[in-house]
Amino acid sequence: MDYILSGLIQALELLFQGDPETFSAVKTTVLASSLSVAASMAIGTPVGFWLGYVPFPGRRPARVVVDTLLSLPTVVIGLLCYAFMTHRGPLGDWGLLFTLPGMAVGQTILGLPIVIAMTATAVESLDQRLKQTLITLGADRRQILLTSLWEARFSLALAGAAAYGRIVSEVGISMMIGGNIKWHTRTITTAIALETGKGQFATGIALGLILMTVALLVNLAMTGLKRMSGT
Amino acid sequence: MMEPMYLLENVRQIYGGRTVLDVERLEIQAHTITGVIGPNGSGKSTLMRILAFVEKPTSGRVSFQGLPWAQADLATRRHMAMLSQEPYLLKRSVQANVAYGLKIRGISDTPARVAEALKQVGLDPERFARRSWRELSGGEAQRVALAARLVVRPNVLLLDEPTASVDRKNSDLIQRAALDARNRSGTTLIIISHQLEWLQEVSDHILSMNYGHLVRVQ
């Protein structure tokens, strides 16, 4: 038990002293996950809206595929991205492997099904009276679409928060695509895995505490958003 | 002779093989008040949705100021506004809800028009404009929804049982505001209501419906 307790004390010291290695991992994590959540929202929101709003043939199977992708393992995404980004792969010339943008691409694939599925559900749950109200108030198609999205804004933000929570805590993609390179692509989760393997519990616990804080903030945001969206 | 505001000829609406509306001929003149009565399921609301250009009839001819349904564009649709029994308020403030119709029409001078519309439905703009949609009672929400229609000064206002789920005080205020719109700007009113006494008092014509048919026109 002693080594856990002393690890915790050392962890707090590292955090309060502003240990550069620890904060480099935090910075990389925040950068990569913010980039990937932004991309997931930019692509996933219109796709999710289309899936939830527009009746088209094959809508139900498409929804099943998206729901299935929710449980896609991060190592599988990592493996696929690696195969595409390695110098022999089709995207090899882009030089994405072992870079922060490369990690963000993989994490976007992880976040996309979450954003698409939750946006589709949010749009499907919109009050049936909304469309008729907007038509009778004189809205055109574009205004109906934008107003409907705005009406679902809290649910859409909830989708973003859920995607962020999943992305920030993943290891597989960061490890395989980022390569866990110190000062460069080392994230909180890959650093925890490495430091624990080396027996450096203090750094691992310090990073774990930050990750828990991030998770707590995401959870608080989600609780607030759920209350605001009335779900 | 003046062209009627609405002309319906051989209009039928069929849902899943069941005819819910079958109107041989109906004319509604401009600047009049038309009351619509009938039991539940008699086709009143379907008729309203067709008149509001929300639903296209299965067959027949509907024209608005001489313009056929198929040729009615957004500008034509914007001449009319409809209020249902349980209207939907946008998840915004009262001010934003009432101003929505003006905003999408690109009309400035919003605050003054919103204040005027709120006063018309008996709501004090100072007290209500900044309130959230959550902070309204059922009757207040109904009046805000009516203000959101009145603010665009429609040529036709379709009211589908606007007072069915509100108390007496709110019901009186809604009725007064609707009549005020007609008196002020000559708005054509088409009102579905179970308050026959009131309809008889204010309407120029009363349509009685049953099983999708117009059974009587007074």
Image (cartoon, grey):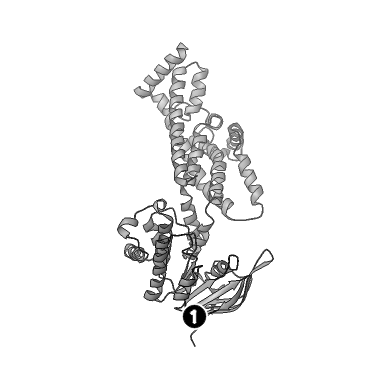
Residue appearing at x 40%, y 27% in the figure: A23
Residue appearing at x 41%, y 20% in the figure: A11
Q: Can residue A222 be seen in this view?
A: yes
Residue B105 screen position, x and y as percent: 42, 66
Q: In this view, does B33 lie above or below A178?
A: below
Residue nearest the viewer, comparing B171 with A202: B171
| Mark 1, residue position | B29
- What's under tag 1, amino acid-wise? Gln
Q: In this view, does A158 lie above or below B34?
A: above
Residue A79 screen position, x and y as percent: 61, 33
Secondary structure under the numbered disc 1 in the rendered image: loop
Dot 1 crowding, Cα within 10 Å, few <14, some 14–19, many 20+? some
Residue appearing at x 59%, y 51% in the figure: A51
Q: Is residue B79 visible?
A: no
The answer to whether residue B169 is left or right of residue B27 is: left
Direction bottom: furthest residue: B1
Residue appearing at x 46%, y 25% in the figure: A208
Residue A53 screen position, x and y as percent: 57, 54
Residue A126 screen position, x and y as percent: 52, 52
Residue nearest the viewer, comparing A145 with A219: A219
Residue nearest the viewer, comparing A121 with B127: B127
Direction right: furthest residue: B17
Residue nearest the viewer, comparing A122 with B73: A122
Which chain letter goes with mark 1?
B
